[in-house]
Image: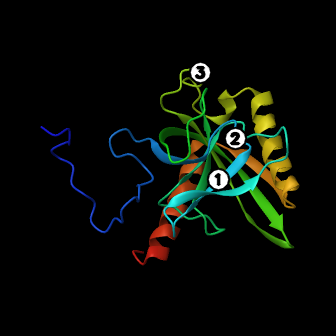
Amino acid sequence: MTGRRKNRRPVEGRKPGQIPAWDRDSGHLNVVVDTPKGSAIKFKYDSSHQMYKISHLLPPGTVFPFDFGSISSTLAEDGDPLDVLILMEEGSFAGCLVQVRLVGVLEAKQTQEDKTQRNDRLIGVAAVSRVYETIRTLDDLPVRRLTEIEHYFVSYNQERGRKFRLMGRFGPARARTLIQKGEKRYRDDQGHG
C-alpha cells in the first residue's frame, strides 16, 4: 500500500493546487496560511509564479498576532480569496494548510482612495489547538482578545492609508453563509457557475 486512500478520486475539473473550502471528512475549513503569526512581513500568494512574495513590511515593532490565511477556492468582493485569522498557540509558515473550526466573522468595510468595499475577516480556531479547543463562537473568546483583534485590523489598515470600519461581530452560521457566497463567486469566476 502506498499510503493513498483507496476511495479517494481526484475531483474532476480541479486545477493543481486548488483546495476545496471544506474538508469532506472532518467538516473543517481548509485555510492556507499566507502570513504566519509573529511575522512583520505580509506575504501574498502570486499565482502567476506559483509562490509567495512580499506584499509589504509592517512598521517596526508590529507583527501579525496570529496566522493569517485564505480559502483558495473562494473569492471575496475585492477579488481575492476570503481571509481567515487562525487562532492557534504557535505560528506555522506561509503555504501551510491548516484545518480550522469556523467560530465567526468580523464584518467590515474598507475604504481606500475613496472606494469602499466589504473586507470581512473570518475567525477560526485551528482544529489541533489545545489552548482554543473550547472556543465554538466569538462569544467564547475573552472580550479583551476580540477587541485586540479588531484594533489590530483597524491600525493595520490605517498604517496602509486605508480606513477599516467594523460593522459587527457574528457567529459561525453567518460566517458559513459568507463562505458559501465566496465559493459561488469563485465558481462563477472560473466559469463553473
Q: What residue is pinned by disc 2? A: 39
Is label 3 in a helix, a strand or a loop?
loop
Which label sits on residue 43? 1
Q: Report the side of 69 relative to 144 (left or right).
A: left
Q: CA distance from mark 3 to mark 2?
A: 21 Å
Which of these two is toward me, 168 or 150?
150
Q: Residue at x 47, y 45 (%)?
A: 29
| Direction bottom: furthest residue | 191
Q: Secondary structure beneath disc 2?
A: loop
Q: Quadrant of the C terminus?
A: bottom left
Mark 3 or 2, closer to the camera? 2
Could you tell whether 63 is left or right of 123 in the image?
Answer: right
Residue located 80% across and 35% down the image: 148
Q: Amino acid at mark 3?
A: Val
Q: Which residue is mark 3?
A: 131
* Quarter of the N terminus within the rendering: top left
Q: How is the image coloured?
A: rainbow
Give the tally of numbered discs. 3
Say if mark 3 contacts mark 2, CB within 8 Å: no
> What residue sits 49% from the left and 58% below the top?
72
**117, 40: nearer the viewer:** 40
Between 16 and 149, the residue placed more toward the observer is 16
Q: Earlier in the sequence, mark 3 or mark 2?
A: 2
First in residue order: circle 1 vs circle 3: 1
Residue at 62% from the left image edge and 53% from the top image edge: 83
**Residue 189: image x %, image y %?**
49, 75
Say if mark 2 contacts mark 1, CB within 8 Å. Answer: yes
| Residue 115 image offset from top left, x and y in percent | 81, 73
> Can you name the residue that lies furthest to the left here?
1
Q: Amino acid at mark 1?
A: Phe
Using the numbered discs, state the Cα–Cα distance from disc 2 to disc 1 in whole angstroms.
9 Å
Amino acid beneath label 2: Ser
